[in-house]
Image (tube, rainbow, N blue to C red):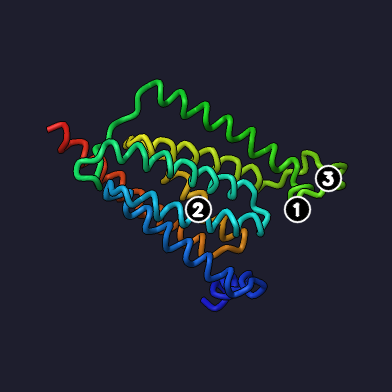
Amino acid sequence: MQEILNFLIEPYQSYEPWKIALEVLATIMGISSVFFSMKRNIWVFPTGIISTLIYIYLLFNWGLYGDMLINFYYATMSIYGWFVWSKNTQDQVHVEVEYMSKKEWFFAVLLFLTSAVLVLAIYYFRPVLSQNFDLTKMNEVGFHYQWTDYVDTCTTGIFLVGMWVMARRKVENWFFWILGDLISVPLYLYKGLAVTSIQYLIFTILAITGFVMWKRSMKEYQG
């Protein structure tokens, strides 16, 4: 047990206390956002925006550019989703949900492939980005990928699709969240971000619950 605790705590010994506090706050807001999503409650978006803006700052400082891109996209799509949900509410708070069409599945695949190319391009220029856009490091750029870069690329695509599908009020969004969350739990442990890893473990449980709740809502809506 002590070894496990040391594994979880040791990476944080080099972090500034206020950054740890920010990660905890982002985690709380992120969990709140998923909870509201389960309830089909429009508050999923303002809480999610707070969480993602904090993570954009933290992830950039930690050099996790794929993850940072996910959160930048989350913030953008949260604004879009907020607009879409506000036009489809039952009571100004809750929304009806639907299943994806074949056309939406096509765009989901296209979005995944596009995001994969973009994230791999970002990691290609990692030496420049990690040195605050120092163009003198251009001679160091190249295909110097680590295995975590490929996993980041995969989870980025999964989460981007999940966010887009959720913003469009589709039940299948939970499939993407569950898959991405399951991959992220061990990934963030490996990266030394235990708080975020625990967040994704909670996300996985909430996503499974959310799928059940949204599917039940669809049955009730269809009579």
In this view, 21 is above or below 64? below
Residue 214 - label: none
Tell which of 187 and 37 is nearer to you.
Answer: 37
The percent position of residue 37, horizontal first and vertical second, equals 33, 49
Identified by mark 1, the residue type is: Asn
Dot 2 or dot 3, earlier in sequence? 2
- In percent of width and height, residue 52 lies at 50, 53
Which of the labelled discs sits on residue 52, or is there none?
2
- Which residue is painted at 49% across and 67% down in the image? 24
188 sits left or right of 126 in the view: left
**Could you tell me which residue is drawn at 12 percent across and 33 percent down?**
223
Q: Of helix, strand and loop, which one carries label 2? A: helix
Q: Residue at x 26, y 42 (%)?
A: 214
Residue topped by disc 1:
132
Please name whichever residue, 89 or 207, is drawn nearer the observer in this view of the structure: 89
User: x, y percentage for residue 211?
Assistant: 31, 44
> Is 52 drawn above or below residue 143 in the view shown?
below
Labelled disc at residue 135: 3
Q: CA distance from mark 2 to mark 3?
A: 28 Å
